[in-house]
Amino acid sequence: MDFLQLAKDRYSVRSFSDKKVEKEKLDYILEAGRVAPTACNNQPQRVLVVQSEEALAKWRRCTRCHFNEQLVLITCYDREQVWHRSYDGHDSGDVDASIVTTHQMLAAWEKGVGSTWIMFFDPDAVKAEFNLPDNIVPVSALAMGYAAEDAKPSDRHGSKKDAKETIIYDTF
């Protein structure tokens, strides 16, 4: 599948079957995130692989977004390893973690594994449930697994703004 077609076809799966993601596919997805670009190649990402029943129960205490997922990848960053912009001190953590998550999401789809990006969670609860030190900042989570038979894209999936509304050429 070519990349643009993969990006167009991928949708947020919000209903997963009970089938577990195979180790080979999980390893592939994790590798796609590991090789994602980060600011100055600092690689501040820390990915929590949540797949045991005990760990999934901890995750479910952090959010009300549940889809019978069999796997969750929580992408965090180490605030001590991010790049800081000299103009205002803004750090690259959220952006770096988002790039990693995007790579994982698209690699999963390529392998037939569905996902939905979850940002609606309590980061303090994640830190407490997973015993994370203060320098680790949770940013996003991918609930993952194989789509249930009744899974389908949102009605808004195919609705995209015209390029003229989102792309600005050097006419400013």
Image (tube, rainbow, N blue to C red):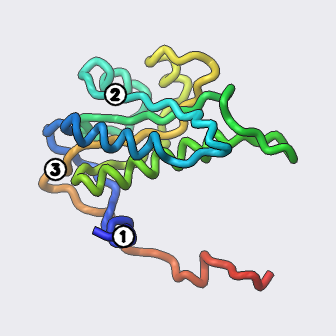
Q: Quadrant of residue 133?
A: top right
Pointer 1 residue: 8
User: CA–CA distance between discs 1 and 2?
Assistant: 27 Å
**Residue 149: horizontal and vertical position, in percent?**
12, 54
Q: Which residue corresponds to the image point at 27% horizontal and 51% vertical from the top-left?
A: 114
Q: Earlier in the sequence, mark 3 or mark 1?
A: 1
Quarter placement of the C terminus = bottom right
Q: Which mark is residue 165?
A: none
Count neighbours of disc 3 (C-alpha within 10 A) and say few if under 14, some if 14 to 19, many if 20 or more.
some
Count neighbours of disc 1 (C-alpha within 10 A) and say few if under 14, some if 14 to 19, many if 20 or more.
few
User: CA–CA distance between discs 3 and 1?
Assistant: 20 Å
Q: Which residue corresponds to the image point at 26% horizontal and 22% vertical from the top-left?
A: 52
**Residue 88: horizontal and vertical position, in percent?**
85, 44
Q: Which residue corresponds to the image point at 38% horizontal and 41% vertical from the top-left?
A: 31
**Pointers 3 and 1 in contact (C-beta within 8 Å):** no
Q: Earlier in the sequence, mark 1 or mark 2?
A: 1
Q: Amino acid at mark 2?
A: Val
Pointer 2 residue: 50
**Pointers 1 and 2 in contact (C-beta within 8 Å):** no
